């Protein structure tokens, strides 16, 4: 009769004496959810956001190696002698689903302002309107109207669009009695 | 005297004199300083009036525009309703567009010393410069990636609506300005520097 291997002995064999903490598993899972959300925003964002994301992804890739190690170890638990669904959850330390979702949501809330800011900045930086422009007079039209009405003698009423000014055409400076157009303000 | 009222000239003095039977000189001053000078010249048949318009900034700058008007109403000599048929901007008229508070835009017209700061939230933003001092403000809406609409107001009342469009190659910017009560919009075309 073969000697039965105890779970603690089996785990020690698999991990070389190192134990996997529940937090290690959780961090890997949360990161995965966060980056799924970021990717959705990333697809709508601009180059600035993509650059920012790319930098983050590089860092994530480095951490990814560690995460993959954790996942591969997790699957190895399936051949544990005492393996079943309930034991599995306890073995890898997965918290209840609602608690896990709450943590993910908190992390998204933390990252969201930065993502929004990056998106806004990306739009501004990419706005095609930004730049220096020079007028092309040959294609420009600025229609204008004016009215000049004789009031007898040398007196004339002028309306340049901002109200009527009546003066004597004698070269002297005159207030004109400007009747203001409220839309223009000062005429 | 096309742009005589463009900047708002409350508290100014107006003068006009006949330099010749077919030529008038029209000037506007404020506090003794010459703001603008327009030389009006009638055609021989009296059907058109050419306006050599010059506006002088306090910083020594000059805006030079030439207008050709056509008589549309009754009258003789200079007395008539005049409608421009040709406008020539002789001065450089640069337009600068910058980012404003993240996702907004600033439209800076150096010649008019006007800066329109807008964000695309439908709110009114006060203009910078003399126009802002007179209660001018602007709000903006984004129609699509290459089209914006800016509504300008003075003391809360709409003065004009500007549709700003970019060409497909993003090299040409066109500002079409509609003034309430006028059926003839102005169209300013800019090339990217």
Image (cartoon, coloured by chain):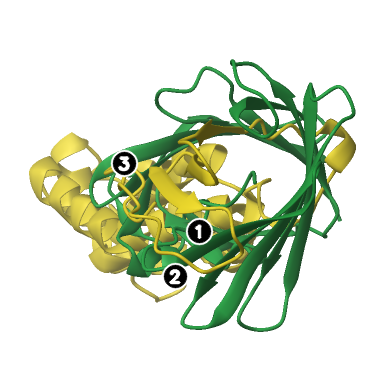
Mark 2 — on which chain does it sit? B
Q: Which mark is residue B7?
A: 1
Which residue is situated farthest in the front direction here?
A: A153
Q: Nearer the viewer, residue A21 or B64?
A: B64
Question: Element under label 3?
Answer: loop
Q: Are marks 2 and 1 in contact (CB under 8 Å)?
A: yes
Q: Residue A105, how many percent across, how many down?
A: 20, 50
**Mark 2 → mark 1, Cα distance in angstroms:** 9 Å
Q: Which mark is residue A145?
A: none
Q: Nearer the viewer, residue A170 or B4?
A: A170
**Mark 1 → mark 3, Cα distance in angstroms:** 13 Å
Q: Are marks 1 and 3 in contact (CB under 8 Å)?
A: no
Quickly name the residue at label 3.
A183
Viewer can see residue A94: no
Dot 2 alpha-carbon crowd within 10 angstroms: few under 14, some 14 to 19, many 20 or more: some
Question: Element under label 1?
Answer: loop
The residue at the point 74 percent across, 23 percent down is B70
Quickly name the residue at label 2.
B130
Q: Nearer the viewer, residue A171 or B186?
A: A171
Viewer can see residue B58: yes
Mark 3 — on which chain does it sit? A
Q: Is residue B145 above or below residue B72?
A: below
Question: Element under label 2?
Answer: helix
Identify the hue of chain A: yellow
Please determine if labels 2 and 1 lie on a single subunit: yes
Q: Quadrant of residue B9?
A: bottom left
Q: Is residue B140 above or below residue A168?
A: above
Identify the hue of chain B: green
The residue at the point 37 percent across, 63 percent down is B10
């Amino acid at each position: 009769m073969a000697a039965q291997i105890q779970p603690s002995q089996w785990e020690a064999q698999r991990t070389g004496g190192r134990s996997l903490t529940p937090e290690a598993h959780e961090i890997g899972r949360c990161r995965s959810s966060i980056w799924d959300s970021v990717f959705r925003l990333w697809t709508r964002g601009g180059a600035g956001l993509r650059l920012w994301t790319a930098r983050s992804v590089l860092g994530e890739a480095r951490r990814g190696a560690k995460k993959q190690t954790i996942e591969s170890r997790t699957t190895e638990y399936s051949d544990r002698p005492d393996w079943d669904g309930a034991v599995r959850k306890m073995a890898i330390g997965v918290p209840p689903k609602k608690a896990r979702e709450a943590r993910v949501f908190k992390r998204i809330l933390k990252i969201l302002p930065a993502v929004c800011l990056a998106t806004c900045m990306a739009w501004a930086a990419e706005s095609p309107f930004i730049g220096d422009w020079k007028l092309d007079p040959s294609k420009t039209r600025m229609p204008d109207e004016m009215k000049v009405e004789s009031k007898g003698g040398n007196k004339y009423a002028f309306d340049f669009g901002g109200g009527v000014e009546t003066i004597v055409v004698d070269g002297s400076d005159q207030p004109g009695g400007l009747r203001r157009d409220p839309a223009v303000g000062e005429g | 005297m096309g742009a005589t009222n463009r900047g708002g000239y409350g508290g100014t003095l107006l003068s006009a004199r006949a330099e010749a039977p077919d030529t008038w000189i029209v000037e506007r001053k404020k506090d003794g300083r010459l703001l603008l000078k327009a030389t009006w010249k009638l055609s021989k048949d009296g059907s058109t009036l050419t306006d050599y318009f010059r506006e002088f900034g306090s910083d020594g700058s000059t805006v030079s525009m030439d207008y050709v008007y056509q008589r549309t109403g009754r009258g003789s000599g200079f007395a008539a309703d005049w409608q421009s048929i040709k406008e020539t901007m002789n001065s450089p008229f640069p337009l600068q567009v910058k980012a404003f508070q993240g996702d907004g835009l600033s439209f800076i017209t150096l010649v008019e010393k006007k800066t329109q700061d807008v964000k695309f939230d439908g709110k009114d933003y006060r203009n910078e410069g003399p126009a802002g001092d007179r209660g001018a403000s602007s709000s903006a809406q984004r129609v699509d990636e290459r089209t914006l609409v800016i509504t300008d107001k003075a003391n809360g009342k709409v003065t004009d609506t500007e549709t700003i469009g970019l060409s497909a190659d993003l090299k040409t910017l066109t500002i079409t300005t509609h003034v309430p009560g006028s059926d003839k919009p102005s169209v300013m075309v800019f090339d990217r520097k």
